[in-house]
Image (cartoon, coloured by chain):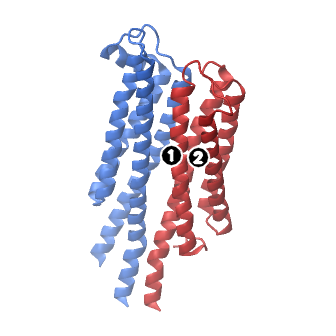
Chain colours: A blue, B red
Amino acid sequence: MTNTSSENEKTSKTLHRIFLFLYLQFAFYWATIAAGMYDNYYYAVPSTVQANFSNIFLQFFAAPDVFVHVAFAVLSTSMSIPVIVYARRVGLSKVVLLHVGAMSSRLVGFVAGPLFIYFSTSSINNAMSASLSTFIMASVFLVAVILTFLSRIFIVREDVRIKFAAPMQQSLVGR
Amino acid sequence: MEREEIGNLGLRGLSLTLRLCYANFLVYLLLYVTGMYINIYVTSGVNTIGISDITNIVHMVLAIVNFAFTFVIMVVGFLYAMRKVALFSLGAVASLVIATVGGMLFLSTGGGRQSGDITLLGGWVMSFLFMLALFLSYYATLKIVRAIRITELVKPTEQRMT
């Protein structure tokens, strides 16, 4: 019984760490959308940007508001890595899958973002495709948010099970 | 157990409130999609949007439903001793109210990308406060999920012990 109790304590600590990373992830999600909407309203692709990979990549560092948006997007996505590691450790396979799904959908967003700049360059200037890229970026962001939201429900359920179900079963066995 | 907030709503009431929370998330989702559609396909160029445009009406009706659902969840939290649910929902309600003011500012000052700085500011305030409201509503929902789970676990064990 002592073994089970110490295992539960360990799992509880790991879940607590997952909670911390999820808090950070949600804060970064919020910052990503705040910065993204700021770019949406205030940022215009300069006419000097060429429609090639290196020029578009450098644009992320040239414009501070775009850099902030991309940095928060990367940070929010990378928060899934420790969550996956810890969730694997405590055997929460659904949480792992949901976060892998969230990261995959964000990767689509990381393609659609540069595509928006590509289609907005003066040489390409395709407003329709630029709009579609933005729409894809916004949609996959929402998908990622929903997937991570769902993951937290499973973590809460496990946390409650450890804190309440296990001690109750032990006390019943003791009686 | 003392730190947990299960309130005095009972399992049935909690389940009903959770369903309302899920319905609210569906409304949040539709609000996001219609908002993005307006943002990208209507007002991104030289076009403007007015209060009577059909896409705007759909978006505003969804915003009203969203506000109503969030408000009900907040009241349930206050009435049935779930302080965290009430406070998270209160934050969401406050965010939605200010976001609506931002949206009205966007509409009343031109309703387009080229209508000036105040219009853009209104749009930006609307967007990021919407997301804040979504996160706060989500935390309120998690507290209800937790309360349901605890109630489910405690009830059968108590029955067995008696």
Q: Name the front one of labels 1 and 2.
A: 1
Q: Nearer the viewer, residue B73 or A167?
A: B73
Q: Tag 1's secondary structure?
A: helix
- Tell me the subunit letter for badge 2: B
Instruction: Find disc 1 in the rendering and name its residue.
Output: B29
Is A119 rendered above or below residue A150? above
Q: Earlier in the sequence, mark 1 or mark 2?
A: 1
**Quadrant housing residue A105:** top left
Q: Tell me residue A95's x, y (percent).
A: 33, 55
Q: Amino acid at mark 2?
A: Ala
Q: Tell me residue B58's x, y (percent).
A: 60, 41
Residue drawn at x 65%, y 47% as measured from the top left: B64
What's the mark number on residue B133? 2
Quadrant of image for the N terminus of chain A: bottom left
Marks 1, 2 in one chain:
yes
Crowding near pointer 1: few (<14 within 10 Å), some, many (20+)? Answer: some
Q: Nearer the viewer, residue A156 or B19?
A: B19
